[in-house]
Amino acid sequence: MNSISDPPKRAFVFLARAGAWTPVALLEVGLQREGRPHYSFSYGRKWRARADAFPLDPVHLPLDSAIEPSPRMFGALLDSGPDRWGNRLLDERFAEKARPPTILDRLLLAGDDRAGALAFGPTADAPVLRPAMVPIRDLAAVEEAMVRFDAGERLEPDLAVLANGTSLGGARPKATVRRTDGGLWLAKFRRKADAIDVVRAEHATMTLAAAAGLRVADTEVVSLGANREALLVRRFDRCLDDRRPYLSALSLTGRAETDVGGGYPEIADAMRPHQVGSGRADLVELYRRMVFNVAIGNTDDHLKNHGFLRAEGGWTLSPAFDVVPTVDGDDFQAISVGRMGTTPSRANLLSECGRFGLGAEDASAITARILEVTARWREHFAACGVPDADLRVIGRRVGRL
């Protein structure tokens, strides 16, 4: 294996199957004439020959045809790498090294809490993943360390396990915790710079979304003592130690995080050929989520915040996650809603309803039902413990339809 001073040139890609790691592909890194990296990906013959084989990305990593080298890392693999918070933690590990981490470093070094069912190793031998999960009993100490790290302090040596990174949930301080029953939950912590109590507000939003008929990840607020709390979000890509393949909408649509554009109708078009069964139920669910995000003022609804889980015969929408009113920035959605782009209006929501398999009448009825629920947001948020001052701030965003 390369030392940490030498950038790795390749990685074997593994998929969790029936409790074991199965090698499925080889990922290689080369350099173009300009010195920029390019990435090559090829499935192994044994994986291709299996009756239960499937592509890790049905659009950009097809199983039955050659895959062209790419100047950027394949999105389906990045989905199993660190998120923005995890990358900050991994950067800490390289702070005193002779070079910054490469993308391949980040894939190889990410911990065992990575999203989905992929892993990466330097050889064809089953990978040994670095531990990145903590027991629920240590949550208060972890929260304290994460808040200090977020403020610019160094990570304490006895919590070095956390430097293996996280793979879900964006830039917010977090850690994956194992509860006493063995279940895995993502613990999300407050930040000193938060304008509102995001822990309580996200729990309130997620439970309100469930009341509106959306499929959402389970959430729970837990006390850490001394007026400190954390939001626990159940890991929907895990059932105890069983891992489910995961693919973000960013990857399925072939976009990069730096791209401008993308939208809910584009997600619908991309997912339609690869859905389980007819796929209409998921298309309607996606439409519901679009309406709810606009109604509740969640403008952080970018493509990375929508995803899919592998099911028998195709892919299905994952439960919704990271849904909370955005209290800063402008009033436009992160991605397109309809023919008027990112404009948060009822007319725009209805303008492309056919791409979700809906007629105008059905789409209007769905919109009306969701708005009936979100109209009661203030009462629901208050019952979930969101402070009055925060309700006033959130109220400037909610009710735009």
Image: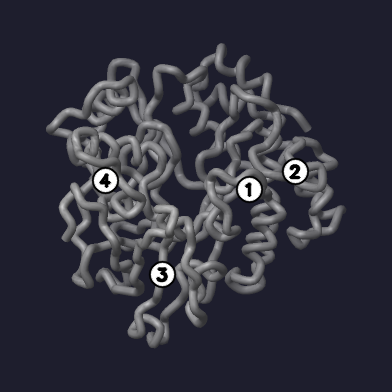
**Which is in the foreground here, disc 2 or disc 4?**
4
Q: Secondary structure at mark 1?
A: loop
SS for callout 2: helix
**Mark with earlier residue (4, 3):** 3
Q: CA distance from mark 4 to mark 3?
A: 33 Å
Q: Are marks 2 and 1 in contact (CB under 8 Å)?
A: yes
Assign a secondary structure to mark 4.
strand
Q: Which mark is residue 213?
A: 1
Residue at the image point whose x is 47% and y is 73% from the top: 55
Alpha carbon of mark 3 to alpha carbon of mark 1: how far?
40 Å
Q: Which amino acid type is marked by label 3? A: Phe
User: Which residue is the site of mark 3?
Assistant: 41
Question: Could you say which disc has been placed on residue 369 in the image?
Answer: 2
Q: Residue at label 4?
A: 178
Residue 120 drawn at (x, y percent): 29, 61
Q: Locate residue 189: give its quadrant.
A: top left
